Amino acid sequence: MAASAPDEKKTPRTEKGRRTLRKLLDAAAGEFGDHGFHEASISSITRRAGVALGTFYTYFDSKDEIFRALVADMSESVKRAAREAIAPEMGALEVERAALEAFLRFAGEHKEVYRIIDEAEFVDPRSYRMHYETVGARIIERLEKGGDSGAMREGLGEIEAWALMGMNVFLGLRYAIWRGEGDPDAAEVAEAANRMLQSGIGRSTD
């Protein structure tokens, strides 16, 4: 996931420093994902990262601070996964399909993301809200572009974006986190969701 430091003064300026920060964030993801915020400790994070306890404080002042940085890091990683899956020539609906498939694959590879983001609601509500508002803003932008291109209805905005985000989050929970043997893969789930976006679920009365 993309490294993110909370304090500009502590942002690493060397490749070695960036690698160390990455180790700490990855270790924090594992520790918070396995044990939750309250059971995790700075010493357990540094042990996972394979760095000295003092090194932690070169980058972060507290467990709360690395948790906030981790939520921001995960949010950025979700954004990057979707961005890398989208090609300029894709139409608006195809963009939504590709973004959802990328998210499902990301969540399947980083199952801890759900526990950590959910826990942020109580550990750091500001980070929790910022995560979803940031994701929602990106979807609003895509829907507006879809309306401008004629591929989607005009006037789509925040309500539709948050409804779409809610669908994606729960599809991720069911088919990435709770995935079972024989379940459809990410591509199949994204395709089914995309058909619903395109055609709706109401029966035509024509």
Image (cartoon, grey):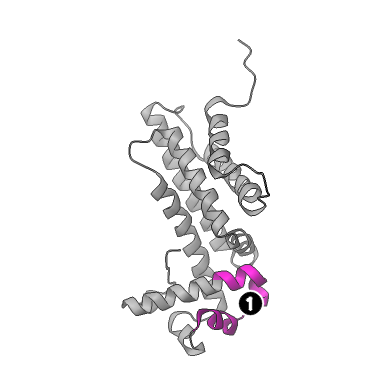
SS for tag 1? loop
- Residue 108 vs residue 32, the one in the foreground: 108
Please give the range of residues in magenta.
29-50
Quarter location, residue 142: top left
Task: Say whether residue 175 is left or right of residue 141.
Answer: right
Task: Say whether residue 25 is left or right of residue 201.
Answer: left
Location of the N terminus (image quadrant) = bottom left
Residue 93 is covered by the magenta coloring: no
Residue at the spot 42% in from the left edge and 68% down from the top edge: 3
Specify the amino acid type for callout 1.
Ala
Residue 35 is covered by the magenta coloring: yes
Q: Look at the magenta stretch and give its main secondary structure.
A: helix
| Residue 202 image position (x, y, % from top left) | 64, 23
Q: In this view, does 17 lie above or below 180?
A: below
Location of the C terminus (image quadrant) = top right
Q: Name the residue under label 1.
A: 40
Task: Say whether residue 149 is left or right of residue 113.
Answer: left
- Residue 61 vs residue 84, the one in the foreground: 84
| Category of crowding for the residue at label 1, using alpha-carbon neighbours closer than 10 angstroms: few (below 14), some (14–19), many (at least 20) | some
